[in-house]
Image (cartoon, helix red, strand yellow):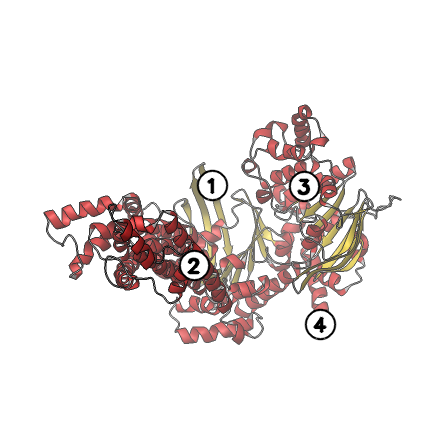
Amino acid sequence: MTGHLLEVRNLTVDFHTARGTVHAVRDVSWHLDRGECLAILGESGSGKSVSASAVMDLIDCPPGQIVSGRILFEGQDLLTLSPDARREINGRRIAMIFQDPMSHLNPVYSVGFQIAEIMTAHGVARAEARARALELMRRVGIPAPESRIDAYPHQFSGGQRQRLMIAMALALKPDILIADEPTTALDVTVQAQILALLEELQQETGMGLLLITHDLGVVAEVADRVVVMNSGEIVETGSAAEVYRTPRHPYTAKLIAAVPGTGEMAAPLDTGIGPILDVQGLTKVFGDFTALQDASLTVLPGETVAIVGESGSGKSTLAKTLLRLEDATAGAAFYAGRDLIAMPPKELFALRREIQMVFQDPTQSLNPRMSVGQIIAEAFVIHPGILPKDRRAARVQDLLRQVGLDPEHIHRYPHQFSGGQRQRIAIARALALEPKLIICDEAVSALDVSIQAQVIDLLNRLQDELGLSYLFIAHDLPLVRDFAHRVVVMQGGRIVEQGPVRQIFEAPREAYTRALLAASLDPDPDVQAERRRARAQLAEAPA
Amino acid sequence: MKGFLGKRAIASAISLVGLIILVFFLSRLTGDPTDLYLPLDASQEARENFRNIHGLNDPLMVQFGRFVGDLARLDFGMSIRRAEPALDAVLRGFAWTLQLAAITMVLVTLLAIVIGSLAAFRVGGLFDRLATFFSLIGASAPDFWIAIVAIVLFSVNLGWVPTSGTGTPWHWILPIGVLFIRPFGLILQVVRGSMISTLSSAYIKTARAKGVKNRPIIFVHALRNAMLPVITVIGDQAAGLLNGAVVVESIFGFPGVGKLMIDSILQRDFAVVLAAIMVTALAIFVMNLLIDVLYAVLDPRIRY
């Protein structure tokens, strides 16, 4: 009998799907003690969430099947308990919070009801539960909880929703909190606040914290120990610092190497010719809300300009206005000397070939009923002047080769490719029109770190070969650091600072840029400890 | 919400005006009402007399103006066959239909929701398969056939319930039973489908992680979310019943507005037909408004 609070021993879980049996996790063992934070690190499909779901009895059987193993909570095997006994433990002894709090909160019930429910479900009287819910909302930092307790989830911001989830999970003072990608959908500054809150609450209650994440930065920020998973198996276990410094398994080493933010920063371009894009005072007003205010920037031929900012900063509005997907309220954008904003539709259509866009989610932006060949060749149908018909098929194959895909796969459909491959298809589709400028809207945000690095390499290579310019919209600062020549920082619809990448990262002038940099997470636990101190200083300094 | 209701009322009033115009001119398009009302061998004198009494010699627009003026006073004219105001006959029939429709829809809704939800909770289980099997049969069986078979079986052979009329509660069993089957099958399918997708949503996972019991998970967390698409179908089906369950009312001799309408069409009693159309149109408008309100009540994200 071991003294661990929670111990998973030799757990194997299968999923029986239409395409056959998938071994979600194989022979996985880990343990968690009181007061410690264990991180399970892995990319999508690694099975990092499966053992936690098994702990919470959240695996649907069928299609799931727990083939073998034990889950010992205070020495008691959870897998042998009755569903009712497990329900008693859920919420009371072991609680869980999830990624994307918006979809994990019931949209039609007030947050007060949902927080109180975890208590009433375990026998607390209604009035008492409500009073305690109020207290919890205050504790997790919801301002004026008395007036907010009957509000609905959609009336809160993303960060507040995750705070509410935490309040809910901690209502009964559980011994263990499982946090499954708790900050993945949040802005960096909010992510830092939520992680700080979790740490604080852990110290306060002495609970064990199990953190499931894909982000080495999150591990460095909060974890004591880390378990690295790859395709259903544990490849490495150790303390966070140990694993980062001396990874023993090649997969871990690869994962660490793929983390952006460590490479050489690009020197400013000096082309000696004028900008390809010159945006002047671009403004977009929706009703009485100003989404974009007086934005001015330039992009040189062959240059990568990154636009960074948190949600609501206006970075996507800027892209949409440039492409005329939204009508600008004021301002101009000169492309090769002609104003995109004032251009008549016919002229704009011809110009559209030269400015292309790659979107965040290739699953949504590629038509699922068209083959890859059709998707790419559609460009030639819309702009028939580019290429005579008989040469189109060969060109599509060339494009596939150029983005690193097998030209043989021309007849396959988007769902037959992985996320990273799909984004390559989206890039090939953009390249088909031989553009000069590509606007990438969070183009790699949905991809795993190692895939992200590959797509960035591809974009770099294409820039060298074809002299492309990129307007790269992103929220991920380390990624931008490695990729951009120049950086534009946006906040609340305004450009707060812009300059060469080195200046922004090494000598930021504006407080907001500094806060953004301090909030971003570094995979190195020591660097992270340094940042935490910097953040604390920023917080103390008057705003 | 108030503004929304006002807008909806105006929009409905506009469609009501359209309906009035359509009904008036369509009934005139079918030819001279004299030919329809009077027997084929009526004398020329009698025809002329009929035209004068009913103002049919006036220009069409004058007739329309008079028609609208009467409507504004809720005067649909006299029923030619019944010697009473058309509206009285219609309202009497409508009261019967409303009771029949209300009882049927309440039963349908309750049972479809409970059975559909339970079926969705264990998809592919025995209960689910049985529910799906029978609801599909119900949704696809023609009601005139069920009505006739039910009469033969329960009234004629077994003698449990009367064949037609409204005298006792026993008289209501067959019409309600027959009307029940189709909407029940249909709504159960919609509830089941909607519940299956709702039960797989993220907030259900949260509820399970909180230790909430199965029954509140189904009937508190999932049901309210799953009801939104269901309400639309319920409204559709209820509108069908309100319009008069023509076939079922006729077969069971039920004195509802559907039977009244069919009888009046056959007897060329146009005042009654017109009154029936206007009353049911109004009822359906009120019901749609109720559904919109219900939507907003169920889902706090909907604010008109």
Identify residue for label 3. Answer: A455
Identify residue for label 1. Answer: A23
Cβ atoms at labels 2 and 3 below 8 Å apart = no
Residue for point 66% across, 37% down? A429
**Do tags 2 and 1 sit on the same chain?**
no
The Cα atoms of the two marked residues, 3 and 4, are separated by 39 Å
Q: What element carries label 3?
A: helix
The location of residue A308, given as percent across then percent down, is 71, 55
Dot 2 amino acid type: Val
Q: Which mark is residue B169?
A: none
Mark with earlier residue (3, 4): 3
The Cα atoms of the two marked residues, 1 and 3, are separated by 28 Å
Dot 1 amino acid type: His
Nearer mark to the viewer, of 4 and 1: 4
Instruction: Using the image, name the chain to which the residue with label 1 belongs.
Output: A
Task: Classify 10 Å Cα crowding around label 2: few (below 14), some (14-19), many (20 and above).
Answer: few
Instruction: Using the image, name the chain to which the residue with label 2 belongs.
Output: B
Q: Is mark 1 on a helix, strand or loop?
A: strand
The location of residue A12, given as percent across then percent down, is 45, 45
**Do tags 2 and 3 sit on the same chain?**
no
Q: Nearer the viewer, residue A275 or B294?
A: B294
Nearer mark to the viewer, of 2 and 3: 2
Nearer mark to the viewer, of 2 and 1: 2
Identify residue for label 4. Answer: A540
Identify residue for label 2. Answer: B62
The location of residue B16, given as percent across then percent down, is 43, 59
Dot 3 amino acid type: Val
